[in-house]
Image (tube, rainbow, N blue to C red):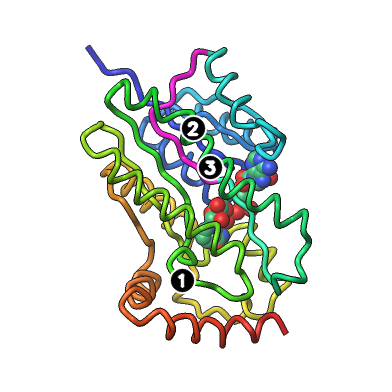
Amino acid sequence: MAQAPETVLVTGASSGIGLELAQVFATHGFDVILVARRKAELEALAERVRREHGVRATVLPADLLVPDASAALVHVLEEQDLEVDILVNNAGLMDMGGFADLDVAKHERLLQLNVVVLASLTRRLLPSMIERGRGRILNVASTSSFQPVPSMALYAASKAFVLSLSESLSEELKGTGVTVTALCPGITRTDMYERAHDEHDIVQNVPGPFLSRVEDVARQGYEACVAGHAVVVPGLPNRLVASAVQLYPRWLVRTVGGFVGRRSTR
Ligand SMILES: NC(=O)c1ccc[n+]([C@@H]2O[C@H](COP(=O)([O-])OP(=O)(O)OC[C@H]3O[C@@H](n4cnc5c(N)ncnc54)[C@H](OP(=O)(O)O)[C@@H]3O)[C@@H](O)[C@H]2O)c1
C-alpha cells in the first residue's frame, strides 16, 4: 500500500525563504500547511502547489505575535485533524541600527517571534513526533548565529539562540526518530533584504558572492532537513566565513565585527 504523504507546516510561508521552502517541499510531494498573516499570499501559494504538484495545501492565516499564538495554532491543527510531520520555524523579524536607538516595541516583537514563538511551537509539536517515532524540525537561523554582530545585536543574539537550541535538540533527540536542523542563510534576496537594502548603506555594499538566491537557500535547507543534518550554511563564501569565525579567537572575531558594525550605526 502506498504511504500517505507527509505534512510540513511552514511559518512565514507568505514570502521569501518560507514561501520557497513550502514550494520545494510541495515539489517533492509533501502536503503543506501554510502559516503567516497575509492570507491572500498564502491562498495564492496553496492554489499553485495544488495545481502544479497535486499536494494537499492548507492555509492557516495567523499573527504569531498575538498572545498565546502558538497554543492557538496547535489547537486549530487538532480541530482540523492535521498531523505535522515536519515543522519549519521560518517566520522572523530583523532590525538594524544602534541597540539603544531602536524602537523598544519592535525589539520585543523581534524577540517574541524569533525566539519565544519558535521555541514554543517546537515544544508543542515535538511530543507527538517523538511518540510516532519520526519527525523533522527545520529552524531558520542565520550566519549571524555564529558571531556577535554589532549593529544587529538583538537579531544576531536571537539567531544564536536558534542555532544553540537546534544543536542541543539534535543531540538530545538522537535515537527518537526526530531530527532538528538549523538552516543558517547568509544575506538572501527577499523582502527582508530589500527593506534593509533601502535603509542601510552597509547592505548596499555587500559583495555579490555573499548574496544568496532564495531558491538555493530553500533547496539546501530542504535537503539538509530530509537528510537529518544538524546545521547547514548555504553558499561557499558563507560556509568559509562561518567556519573561520569558529577557528579564530573570539576577541578577534568580536573586534573585526565591531569595526564593521560601528561604521553602519554612525
Ligand atoms: N533574507 C535574509 O537575508 C535572511 C538571512 C538569514 C536568515 N533569514 C531568516 O529567514 C527567515 C525568513 O525571512 P525572509 O528573508 O524570507 O523575510 P520575509 O520575506 O520578510 O519573510 C518573513 C516571513 O515571516 C512572516 N511573519 C512576519 N511576522 C509575522 C507574524 N507576526 N506572524 C506570522 N508570520 C509573520 C511574514 O509573513 P506575513 O507578513 O504575511 O505575516 C513572512 O512570510 C527569517 O527568520 C529571517 O530571520 C533571512
Residue 245 magenta: no
- Discs 3/2, front: 3
Disc 1 residue crowd, few under 14, some 14–19, many 20+, Cα 10 Å:
some
Q: Amino acid at mark 3?
A: Leu
Q: Is residue 160 left or right of residue 243?
A: right
Q: Quadrant of the N terminus?
A: top left
Q: Is residue 17 left or right of residue 248?
A: right
SS for tag 3? helix
Q: Residue at x 33, y 31 (%)?
A: 135
Vertical order, 74 against 217 (above or below):
above
List the residue tagged with mark 2.
9
Q: Amino acid at mark 2?
A: Leu
Q: Which residues are magenta?
A: 81-90
The percent position of residue 52, horizontal first and vertical second, equals 47, 32
Mark toward the start of the polypeptide (3 vs 2): 2
Q: Residue at x 50, y 46 (%)?
A: 20
Report which quarter residue 265 is drawn in: bottom right
List the residue tagged with mark 1.
147
Cβ of mark 3 under 8 A from ligand 1: no
Disc 2 residue crowd, few under 14, some 14–19, many 20+, Cα 10 Å:
many
List the residue tagged with mark 3.
118
Q: Residue at x 49, y 32 (%)?
A: 9
